[in-house]
Image (cartoon, rainbow, N blue to C red):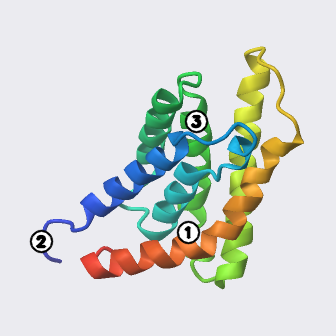
Amino acid sequence: MTDAPPRGGWLILASVLVALFLSILPMPAGIDAFRPPWVALVTLYWCLTVPERFGVFSAFAAGLALDVASGSLFGQHALGLSLVAYAAVELHQRIRLFPLWQQSLFVWVLLLVERLLNLWVVAATGQPIPSLVYWVSTLLGLLLWPWLFVILSDLGRRVGLV
C-alpha cells in the first residue's frame, strides 16, 4: 500500500465542468430537445470506472450544479443522478466485464431511469408534461456512450487515473 496522493482528480472535475457547459450551451429551439444528457453520461462513466473516487455524493453535487446552471427545480437533477450513480456503483464490477455495446445498453437503461425520475419531479410540481421528444436524448446518449467511453478512458490512462 502506497501513500502516494491520488492522481487525476482534476480530470474528473474538468470533465464534469465540460459536461455542465455542454448542458447549458444555447441551442436553437427546434433542436434543444435533442441535447444529450452530458452530465449523466460523464457521471455514469466515472461511477463505472473509478467508483471509489466518484460516487453517489459526487453525482449529487454534479446534479445540484446542473440544477443551478440550468435553472431547474433545486434537487431535480441531483435526485436522478444520485440514484443512477448508486445503481452504477453497485453494479460496476459486472458492467465493466461487458463488451462496449452491452455497456451502452446498460447506460441507456440508466439514462431512461434518470429521465423518468426527472419526469416524475416535473409532474409532481405541476409543470406541463413534455412530449415524446423528451425521450430522444436518451437514444443520443446510447449512441454517444462508446465515443465518450473511449475518449475519457484514453485521457484517464494518460494521467494515470484509469
- Assess disc 1: are there few (<14), some (14-19) or many (≥20) residues with their C-alpha within 10 Å of its C-alpha: some
Residue 15 pos. (x, y %): 39, 58
- 15, above or below 74, in the image: below
Q: Nearer the viewer, residue 40 or 133?
A: 133
**Mark 3 or mark 2, whichever is nearer to me:** 3
Front disc: 3 or 1 = 3
Please, what secondary structure does the residue beneath circle 3 have?
A: helix
- The three-letter amino acid code for the residue at tag 3 is His
Give the spatial CA distance, label 2 vs label 1: 25 Å
Residue 119, label in figure: none
| Residue topped by disc 1 | 92
Q: Dot 1 lies on which element?
A: helix
Left or right, 134 with reference to 3: right
The three-letter code of the residue at mark 1 reads: His
Helix, strand or loop for disc 2: loop
| Residue at the right extreme of this rendering | 132
Q: Residue at x 46, y 45 (%)?
A: 20
Mark 3 nearby-residue class (10 Å; few <14, some 14–19, many ≥20): many
Image spot of residue 117 (x, y percent): 72, 37
Which of pointers 3 and 2 lies earlier in the amino acid sequence?
A: 2
In the displayed structure, 117 sits above or below 105; it is above
Distance from disc 3 to disc 1, alpha carbons, whole Å, reads 21 Å
Q: Which mark is first along the chain, 1 or 2?
A: 2
Judging by the rendered image, the residue that carries numbered circle 2 is 4
Q: Residue at x 29, y 81 (%)?
A: 158
For disc 3, the marked residue is: 77
Which residue is drawn at the image coordinates 69% and 53% (left, top)?
111
Q: CA separation, marks 3 and 2? A: 34 Å
